[in-house]
Image (tube, rainbow, N blue to C red):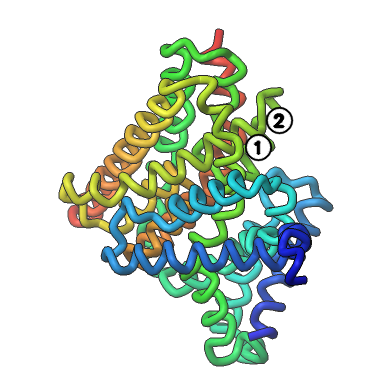
């Protein structure tokens, strides 16, 4: 082993153990920094973990497939975490029940805005049609967005990029934006970030306030439903 | 903890089965969420349900643990994006700018609609 450290690397870089460890370790550090800065929006742990690990993979010439063999165990938990949203929803059911009407109105306005604004802006800046279509579902959670993108014959991997970038931007701007506007209704703040920035926004909302997290989770779920019906409609209306 | 995780997975599994079986246009975990919510609500009405992970705060603790680290779960997908930044570079700054403006506008419209609707509702219920 001593005379050939390279063979050890070759072995480890192909094993899930290394990449799972790298993912958890990098996140632990990024999250500790985020806590240290009182959850400063720019210290977003997803943002910093992803570029650090991304750069590490690039430097070591590791393929995403080998990385994902380890990281899939973390990725898998997205499903159970969605189910787990039932618990804060149950605990805050009284607050939620009194806000059904504002939620439905904001859902309608928000999901239309999310899809129409991106389609209109992308058309106006002269992005190619295939890119415009790939951007349309960017405010919903990645799995659903990629499905919508596929059904439009757009590019699902470009959609995934747009979804993640949208989530991170939303998670970064929501707190300073709402604070500057003096909005301290955490139901409204959470709901807005869940509509605009899906799960990454919801994760941010849970960092700030439990009620905001619950409303973000509801918004994310409802938006996934509405957007899959809405995107084909907006696309036919706006792209004539 | 294992029993609580099993219950969560069981809800997700039931959700996936229902979604696949009936070809529903929604993700399986969302149906799983509804199942878990129904179990929690059912527990209040039928004390017989309060056993295993539904007794005490078993499933609650496991769920809170998962949600406390929700950010972590997006890291693998996020790393995939770093690998595809050439796709973004191809379309330049317009791509990022369009997304940023759209997020900002969506946040503002949603929060404003929510606040206006809840204020109108409150006023309506004050003056019957």
Which of A165/A88 is in front? A165
Q: What residue sits 66% from the left and 78% below the top?
A: B5
Q: What residue sits 29% from the left and 38% below the top?
A: B108
Which residue ends up furthest to the right in the rendered image? B21
Image quadrant where residue A17 sits: bottom right
Return the x and y of residue A14 as percentages of the image width and height: 76, 58
Q: Quadrant of the N terminus of chain B?
A: bottom right
Residue A97 appearing in the image: no
Element assignment for label 1: helix
Return the x and y of residue B65 as percentages of the image width and height: 52, 76
Return the x and y of residue A218 as percentages of the image width and height: 48, 55
Q: What residue sits 62% from the left and 18% below the top?
A: A130
Above or below: residue B14 compared with residue B42? above
Q: Which residue is disc 1 drawn over?
A: A146
Return the x and y of residue A231 as percentages of the image width and height: 57, 28
Q: CA distance from mark 1 to mark 2?
A: 6 Å
Asked if labels 2 and 1 touch by Cβ distance under 8 angstroms, the answer is yes
Q: How many marks?
A: 2
Q: Which residue is disc 2 drawn over?
A: A150
In the figure, is residue B17 to the left or right of A111?
right
Q: Quadrant of the C terminus of chain B?
A: bottom left
Element assignment for label 2: helix
Determine crowd level at label 2: few under 14, some 14-19, many 20+ residues with C-alpha closer than 10 A: some
**Chain letter for the residue marked with disc 2 in the picture:** A
Q: What residue sits 38% from the left and 49% below the top?
A: A171
Which of A70/A38 is in front? A70
Q: Mark on residue A173? A: none
Above or below: residue A115 compared with residue A53? above
**Chain letter for the residue marked with disc 1 in the picture:** A
Image quadrant where residue A125 sits: top left
In the figure, is residue A220 to the left or right of B39?
left
Which residue ends up furthest to the front in the rendered image? A3
């Amino acid at each position: 082993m001593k005379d050939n450290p390279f063979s050890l690397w070759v072995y480890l870089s192909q094993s899930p153990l290394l990449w799972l460890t790298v993912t958890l370790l990098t996140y632990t550090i990024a999250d500790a920094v985020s806590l240290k800065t009182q959850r400063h929006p720019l210290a977003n742990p997803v943002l910093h973990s992803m570029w650090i690990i991304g750069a590490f993979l690039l430097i070591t010439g590791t393929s995403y497939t080998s990385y994902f063999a380890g990281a899939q165990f973390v990725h898998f938990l997205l499903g159970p975490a969605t189910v787990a949203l039932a618990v804060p929803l149950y605990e805050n059911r009284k607050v939620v029940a009194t806000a059904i009407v504002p939620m439905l109105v904001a859902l309608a306005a928000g999901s239309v805005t999310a899809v129409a604004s991106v389609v209109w802006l992308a058309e106006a800046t002269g992005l190619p049609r295939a890119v415009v279509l790939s951007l349309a579902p960017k405010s919903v959670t990645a799995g659903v967005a990629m499905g919508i993108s596929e059904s439009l014959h757009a590019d699902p991997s470009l959609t995934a990029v747009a979804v993640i970038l949208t989530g991170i931007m939303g998670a970064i701007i929501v707190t300073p934006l709402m604070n500057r506007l003096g909005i301290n209704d955490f139901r409204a703040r959470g709901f807005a970030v869940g509509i605009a920035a899906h799960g990454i926004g919801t994760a941010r909302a849970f960092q700030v306030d439990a009620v905001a997290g619950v409303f973000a989770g509801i918004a994310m779920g409802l938006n996934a439903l509405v957007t899959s019906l809405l995107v084909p409609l907006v696309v036919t209306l706006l792209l004539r | 903890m294992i029993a609580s995780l099993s219950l969560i997975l069981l809800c997700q599994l039931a959700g996936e089965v229902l979604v696949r079986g009936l070809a529903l246009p929604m993700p399986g975990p969302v149906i799983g969420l509804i199942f878990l919510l129904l179990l929690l609500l059912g527990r209040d009405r039928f004390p017989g349900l309060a056993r295993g992970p539904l007794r005490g705060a078993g499933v609650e603790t496991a769920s809170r643990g998962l949600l406390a680290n929700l950010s972590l779960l997006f890291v693998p997908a996020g790393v995939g994006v770093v690998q595809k930044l050439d796709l973004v570079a191809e379309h330049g700054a317009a791509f990022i700018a369009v997304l940023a403006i759209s997020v900002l506008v969506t946040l503002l419209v949603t929060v404003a609609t929510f606040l206006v609707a809840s204020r109108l509702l409150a006023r309506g219920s004050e003056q019957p």
